[in-house]
Amino acid sequence: MSETLLEAEGLHSFYGSSHILHGIDFVVRRGETIGLMGRNGMGKTTLIRSMLGHVRPRHGRVAVRGKTMTGSAPYLIARKGIAYVPEGRGIFPNLSVRENLLMAAKPGIDGRRDWTYERVLETFPRLGERLTNGGGQLSGGEQQMLTIGRALMTNPDVLILDEATEGLAPLIAKEIWYIVRQIRATGIATIVIDKNHAAVTSISDRNVILVKGKVAFEGSSAELRAQPELLHKHLGAG
Ligand SMILES: Nc1ncnc2c1ncn2[C@@H]1O[C@H](COP(=O)(O)OP(=O)(O)OP(=O)(O)O)[C@@H](O)[C@H]1O
């Protein structure tokens, strides 16, 4: 079985006295694409934030490449090859597109420099047309592309996309999905959180559905499609 890159075991996380995650087990192996699903407020973002050191779990363990890193600072976890594209984007509005990309550049954990500035521009031709524009002058879709481009410039082994197509026009969302497919094909493991379940299951190897901070389903896209009642019950879809 491929190397485990990111792992949560029995995670319990809280915001103040609100108990949000109730003993979650979650694993990301090299090269796999995981759809993380669930209705609003079920704990998807909290699970990601708990694994990445933004929220300190009260119980349980987080391991990165087999090493326990529960509650480690986010930058230490990022340094281990985990890139996070949060909901709502994270670019520097006063810097140009070129500067936004170049300042993110770093080799991967094993020294890989697969994702160069040139390659990111090939993947996102729209950004190439906007190199001198400020990040804040871009459209929502372009900002999202820049955020993903910045994450790729870090040469990650795991890329986490939290609602990457949220609020985008359908054609732009389609472009983002096309790019996610290309990224997947390069062997980067990806966690995709998105409300478009059909799009998620069309690219994911495995899917995890959260209900009230617990894993309610885990299985392949074929298994999930074979149980449409699950989609209806847990996601309100179909
Ligand atoms: N910073 C916070 N402080 C207090 N409660 C929070 C905070 N962030 C999230 N919550 C609550 O934790 C619960 C889980 O939120 P979370 O964002 O993890 O859900 P989600 O499944 O990602 O849903 P969404 O799609 O709405 O982001 C929700 O009830 C939410 O209101």
Image (cartoon, rainbow, N blue to C red):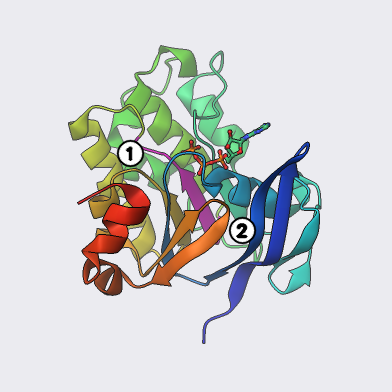
Left or right, residue 166 beside residue 84: left
- Where 155 sits versus 55, above or below? below
Residue 225 on the magenta segment: no
Residue located at (54% from left, 28% from top): 100
**Residue on which disc 1 sits:** 124
Q: Is mark 2 on a helix, strand or loop?
A: loop
* Residue 108: assigned label: 2
Left or right, residue 41 beside residue 179: right
**Total labels drawn:** 2
Residue stretch rendered in magenta on the structure: 156-165
Q: Find residue 104 and report its image quarter.
A: top right
Q: What element carries label 1?
A: loop
Residue located at (73% from left, 44% from top): 14
- Where 67 sits versus 151, above or below? below
Q: What residue type is labelled 2?
A: Gly
Residue 159 on the magenta segment: yes
Q: Which comes sooner in the sequence, label 1 or label 2?
A: 2
- Where 208 sits versus 117, above or below? below
Residue 191: percent from left, percent from top: 47, 56
Mark 1–mark 2 CB contact (< 8 Å): no
**Tag 2: Cα neighbours inside 10 Å, few (<14), some, or many (≥20)?**
many
Left or right, residue 111 beside residue 133: right
